[in-house]
Structure formats: C-alpha cells, structure tokens
Amino acid sequence: MKSSLLLAATAAVIMSACSDNRPIVEASFDVIPQPQSIDTIAGRTGYIISRSTEIHYAPETSEMERHARFLQQYAEDILGYRIPIKAGIPTKTRSADSGILLKLEKGDAQSEAYDILVSSDQMWITSTGTAGIFYGIQTLRKALATAPITGNADGFRVSLPAVHITDAPRFAYRGMHLDVCRHFFPIDSVKTYIDMLALHNMNTFHWHLSDDQGWRIEIKQYPELTSIGSVRKGTMIGRDFSSNDSIPVSGYFTQEEAHEVVRYAAERHIQVIPEIEMPGHMQGALAAYPQLGCTGGPYDVIGWWGISDDVLCVGNPEVVKFCENILDEIMDIFPSKYIHIGGDECPKVRWEKCPKCQAKVRELGLQKDKQFSAEQKLQSWFTHQIDDYLTAHDHTAIGWDEILEGGISDNAVVMSWRGVEGAVEAAHQGHHSIMVPTSYFYFDYYQRRNREHEPLSIGGYVPIEKVYSFNPIPEALTDDEQKYIWGVQANIWTEYIHTFNHVQYMALPRMGALAEVQWCQPEQKDYTRFFANLGNLTHLYDIYSWRWSRQAYEEPMTDE
Ligand code: ACM
Ligand code: ZN
C-alpha cells in the first residue's frame, strides 16, 4: 500500500541549489522482479530527478529514441511532469547534471541484461541489447513509483540512491497467455494486456485465437471461419449447463489488427505466439466448414464450457491441407518463429467410429499398444504432419503436453500444463518445454479460499503465495536436462471472465509473483521481501487504473 501523507512529510526535504526547490522524496530499488544485484555505492549521494532532468540516448537511432520516449511517458505517469529528451550523450564538461543516459553498447544485440549506475550527477542505463535497455527502463520506472508521493505528484522531485545494478533474467521464455475465444476482448484491451506484460519484464504473449466457442482471427482463404465461426448464438448461464442466455457473442481480429498487435508488442520486446488449436477444440471452424468433421455436421459454435467430441476428421486428406493453408496466413501475420498448434483435449470418440479415420489408421498400420491407443497414434501422426510443415517453413511448433502421446515429432516444444510431468518427459527426450502447470499458473482459478465475494471462476485455488513458490526446475532432471526448461508462463482462460477488468483482477498481482519466478535466481526468491515490495507494484497498477486483487493482504494462503 502507498505510504501516507505522514511518510511524505517526514521524507527528506532538502532544498537544492538549483532553481527547482520542490521537496525531494526518496525512492528505492525495491522493485518486482528484484534485480539480480544492487550494490550501494558507499559515501555517494544519489541522483535527483526534477523538471530540469534530461533523458539522453545513444546511438541516435529511432529505436533508442522510442525507448527514451517510453521512459519519458512512464516518468510523467508517475511524476506528473514531462522531462525532455535529447539525442546523444552530453560530454561531462557541458553540464554538471548530465541526466538519465540510455546507452546501447557494442556486443550481443539480443541481450536482455542491463546495468544501472546511479551517481549524483547522472544515471546510466546500459546494455548491449535494446531489450536490456527496455528492462533497465522498467526497473527505473518501478523505482520511481516507490517514492512516497502524495497529492499533487507535480510538486516533488525524486531522489534515487547511488547504486550499481547488474541484472539479467533467469529464463529466456517469460510469458502470459490470454484466451480471447470464450470471451472476446478488443484490440485496446489486448494492448493494455501487453502493457501489463511489459511492466512485469515478460517477453511473450501467447494469444489463444481459436476454440470450440469461437474462431477469432481473420483467415482470408476461409472467410467463413470468422463470418460463421466467430459467432455463437448464446452462452450457458453461470454453471448451469442446461441453460442458454440467447445473447449472441461475436468478435474477431482482422489481419490488420493482428499486425498492429504484433507491432505494438514488438516495440515492447514482446513476441506474439499465436495459437491455432488442432485437431481438437475446433468446433468454431467446423461450424463454418462442416465437411471437415467426421460426421459432416451440422455443427454450432458451442455455447457451453467444455470440450466438444467433434474434432477435425484427420482421415480426410483435405483436413491437413486446410490446417496448412491457415498456418500459411498465420505465419505471414506473426513473425514469431514459434506457432502454437494446441493439441490438447482431443476426444477420440468420433475417430473410433469414422470410416475415413479408421481407414487412415489401417493405412498407417497404427496398432494399439500398452501405452497408446491407435487413435492417440493417429493424433500423433497428424501433429507430425503439421510439425513437418512448420519446420519446412522455418518455424517451430509448440503444443500442449498431449503432443507427447503417441510419440512427439522431432522439433516440437512442449507446454506442460497437466503438472510438470510433460516438461520432465520432454527434457528426457531432448525437447524444450515451458512450465504452465494448472496448480500454479492457471490464473483463471480462484485466488481465495473464501469465494463469497469473489467473481464466479472455473474453480481451483491458486493464491499469490502458491504462484511465488513454484520451482521451475524439477528435481527429476539431470544437470544436462535442465537446459530444456525454456521458461514459465501463466494462462488466463476466459470461460467465466466476461470483461477485461475481470481479466486484470485475475492477473494482478499474481503476475508479479510469476515475474519473480521467471526473472529471479532461486537464491533471490523470498516471499517476505516480495510481499514487502508488492505495494510499490500495485501503486503502479493504481496509476494506470488496472484492477487488482487484494488477496495477498486480506486472505493469505491457507492449507484448507
Ligand atoms: C488446457 O488447459 N486445456 C491446455
Ligand atoms: Zn474422421
């Protein structure tokens, strides 16, 4: 929680020599995620940000200028005034106060690591990568928000302590997922979601774009995916599967909008990984193209929460072509090397009875064995086709952990959601994986045991302490296998989440805990310290009017 007026009044109020004699309040680097090392420079005074502070950047590229503008905007959001930007780094002699200096150095241009050096006359943010500069800016932004500013922010200068910070992320993949199928959130909400990721030093937005309850991305070759597949006639009410509110739900992203999301995310060093589910969770598509199902339909975009038995008829040769054609357009829209192809929760009941699917089983000589049914192997065959296609187009498939069943294809990355076992098995087999186990990272699950005042959710219990406690490296892995754990993500499925405001409530501040799991080294992790710093982060949520849950304060985790 923000400190009170009392704190502001007792904060050091120092009159400075320069013309700006607004009171100075002291900020700290008590931010989330905690930087890897913060060394206090003994005996030195820190840097004071005031209206006369300038942001300088070098080299003078448009990308570095954009980063300077991000910092300018962030500072204004917190301080209420706009500090100027100047291209180039001033020479020391020109001015005693050189300002905030953003300097991209020669070296690994992909680096996410950065340094911050604060002294009385300047503050450096340096990195060899623009991503590193961006994360340095995020840390500074979060530090500014620790200042006990109350009332009119414009009335203050902010002092930062003399420190040397060196920082780098623990995991390369740091993601959040959003399901826009069960409920649709327009592009402005998606951009705000990306802003939320950026604040938490995350670099991947996993965008769940197709499902049984709605198809949400324009595919020019198959216009009915959106004209029919994005519209459901009504939705079950609450948990009552026999009900339907008869209120149509629709919405999809045009390719132009998707390009806009990709651009917006890339500016913030976030890759967008699109997910097109196959061969299950496809009833939105089947409603539009019923000839691609085993029974031929007709099918409706479904209005209840669950998994449809009607899936793509993989015995139909048109189906692989259909998926490839869709993926052609997806690869054109999304520059990400990784494309998520779903693969979870694909019932086999239709395939078991379908003449085309059974003919395919025979043609491929698929036999049931102790581990897998012939139909599981049929799904594995299908996934191999799609994986081969993506690989031939210089892309890599990501799939939910079911893609391990029946034999994983050569290149695929596993997203381990039914616990961590999928990740362990993937690592044993030399495949990369991303940790998203339900019991830690399903942010559609309840945050509190006491549900009386909570919005209706899908179930579960994932308080912030539980998120924080996750160890991404299972003990079952050898030192060599550990490198296959690519990173960590949380998911927000939106069956019971109708509004973006509710998405934020489920995400925040659990994203803060996730950010430390993704970014911090194990020895840095300390829930007590994290909890003490949480108010500095939620203060920023308040500045942006992002809704967040007070569970950490009001209802700490209980065992039962
Ligand atoms: C999933 O939650 N079905 C991946
Ligand atoms: Zn079939």
Image: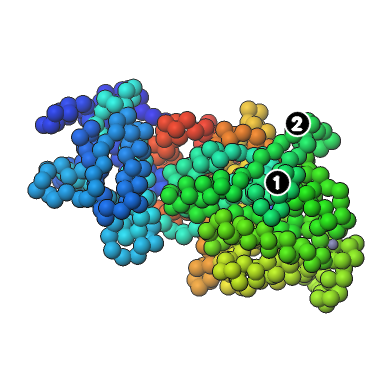
Count the marks: how many?
A: 2
Residue drawn at point x = 69 percent, y = 55 percent: 221
Q: Residue 264 location in percent, x, y?
A: 47, 47
Q: Which residue is mark 1?
A: 226
Q: Is residue 522 left or right of residue 456?
A: left
**Ligand 2 lies in quarter:** bottom right
Q: Is residue 404 visible?
A: no
Q: Amino acid at mark 1?
A: Thr
Q: Which residue is mark 2?
A: 247
Residue drawn at point x = 73 percent, y = 40 percent: 231
Q: Is residue 407 above or below residue 223?
A: below
243 and 393: which one is in front?
393
SS class, disc 1: helix
Residue drawn at point x = 65 percent, y = 43 percent: 252
Image quadrant where one finds the N terminus: top left
Q: Is residue 536 left or right of residue 330?
A: left
SS class, disc 2: loop
Q: Is residue 190 visible?
A: yes
The mark nearer the N terminus, 2 or 1, is: 1
Q: Is ligand 1 closer than 8 angstroms to the Cβ of mark 1?
A: no
Q: Residue 499 location in percent, x, y?
A: 62, 33
Whether residues under marks 2 and 1 lie with C-beta atoms below 8 angstroms apart, the answer is no
Q: Amino acid at mark 2?
A: Ile
